[in-house]
Amino acid sequence: MTHGFCIFATTINASMDYGRKLGAPAIGLETLERAVKTLPGACSLKIGVPRETHLQEKRVALTPGSVGVLTARGHQVVVEHEAGRHAQFADNLYREAGAVIASCAKEVYDQTDIICKITPPDEENLQLLRPRQTLVSAVHLGAVKSEYLQALLAKQITALGFEFIESADGTIPFMQSMSEIAGISSIHIAGELLTGEKGGPGLLLGGITGVPPATVTIIGAGNVGYHAAATAIALGATVKVIDEEVHRLRRLEELLGRKIYTCVAQHDFVAHAVAHADVVIGAAYKKSGRPPMVVTEEMVMSMKDGSVIVDVSIDQGGCIETSRTTTHDHPTYEVHGVTHYCVPNIPSRVPRTASTAISNILSPILVRIGEAGGIPNLFATDVSIRTGIYTFQNHVTQKPLAQMFKLDHMDLSLLYAAQM
């Protein structure tokens, strides 16, 4: 449509303030309408945000602030009841931003055309997807199954994956944000596990005047490794970084703006650095498949009693031989006197920060989709949309994904050209 209207604003009685702080249901809200102009060729989107049901997933795809941006442009947003509860975003905040609160996931799927999630839909949610809907979520390449893709293809779902969405400079903004959170958090976690309160050796990570700091060895010089190194250095720890590629180590030092202990991931170098570490951070990453197993069990046996391993790479299977997946409820275990923390999805520990980071990236994409009149109209000009789509109609459009499951692959540009 050429002119969109009907955004939502609310008036609230003064007596509602206390209830809003407690997250109580909003009573006495009045919906106001006012005209909003949209660009020629633009369309009003119907966007759904269901509550996450995956184990210990506490993030939400859109924050109330982003919902306000979308409704101000004439888009409709339907949010499932308590979708933002774990991130401390009460239903009232979404209502005030113009969203409709749905009582269940089915209402969200039935009333909207674009579904925005953090985790990919499980079997129950796949059943709720309607033919030709658009899905925006993570893909979880390490866990994706052929049956999942087949279900999307059967319903001709246009699926946009967080792991594939690239910026114009070739970076992946969603992955960068979550890697930043994971890298910073890994040092905070390690510092806490070193304390006597958590059964550790009673060390302060950065030491104090006259008392030496802990030594942190980081396996991997990518985004997680960089942010872990920067955080550990800021806290005063002694930092060593190991990677397979010299150019990544050089880039990390340039980003840090200082020389630190670095070495290439050869067995003797790794063994020495691990044996002398109070903390080992597993930050190895491989774009497709499992990261290399850099730290062997023999190396773990050589570590000090009470030392700590935080294997951030566990999302992809881990880069330390003694790592096994744990949960936020039971995050640690001990092997050879070393405390292991191997929880996937570390960003979910700080769901408000992580949700805001994701929403800040996702909401501009949704705005561009609306301004263009739909996702297909962006194929020719928007690199984020073009690189992010992995199924369109009944085709897999990401070649590595198609090859992984021996499915036919169709180039998205050719599909778009065929429709012109």
Image: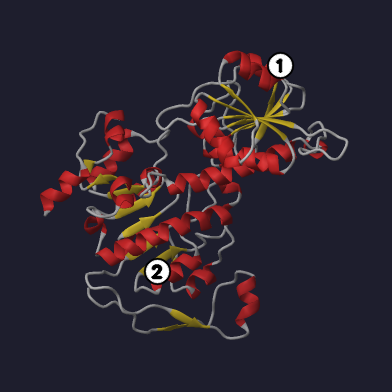
Q: Which residue is mark 2?
A: 70
First in sequence: mark 1 or mark 2? 2
Residue 192 screen position, x and y as percent: 74, 40
Residue 7 screen position, x and y as percent: 38, 78
Any mark on residue 302, and which?
A: 1
Compute the Cα span from label 1 to label 2: 55 Å
Residue 252 screen position, x and y as percent: 56, 36
Q: Would you say residue 388 is visible in this rendering?
A: yes
In terms of depth relative to the viewer, which is nearer, 326 or 66? Answer: 66
Badge 2 element: helix
Residue 70 screen position, x and y as percent: 39, 69
* Circle 1 Cα neighbour tier, 10 Å, few/some/many (<14 / 14–19 / ≥20): some
Q: Is residue 195 above or below residue 340?
A: below
* Circle 2 Cα neighbour tier, 10 Å, few/some/many (<14 / 14–19 / ≥20): many
Any mark on residue 14, and which?
A: none
Q: Amino acid at mark 1?
A: Ser
In terms of depth relative to the viewer, which is nearer, 344 or 206? Answer: 206
Quadrant position of the N terminus in the picture: bottom left
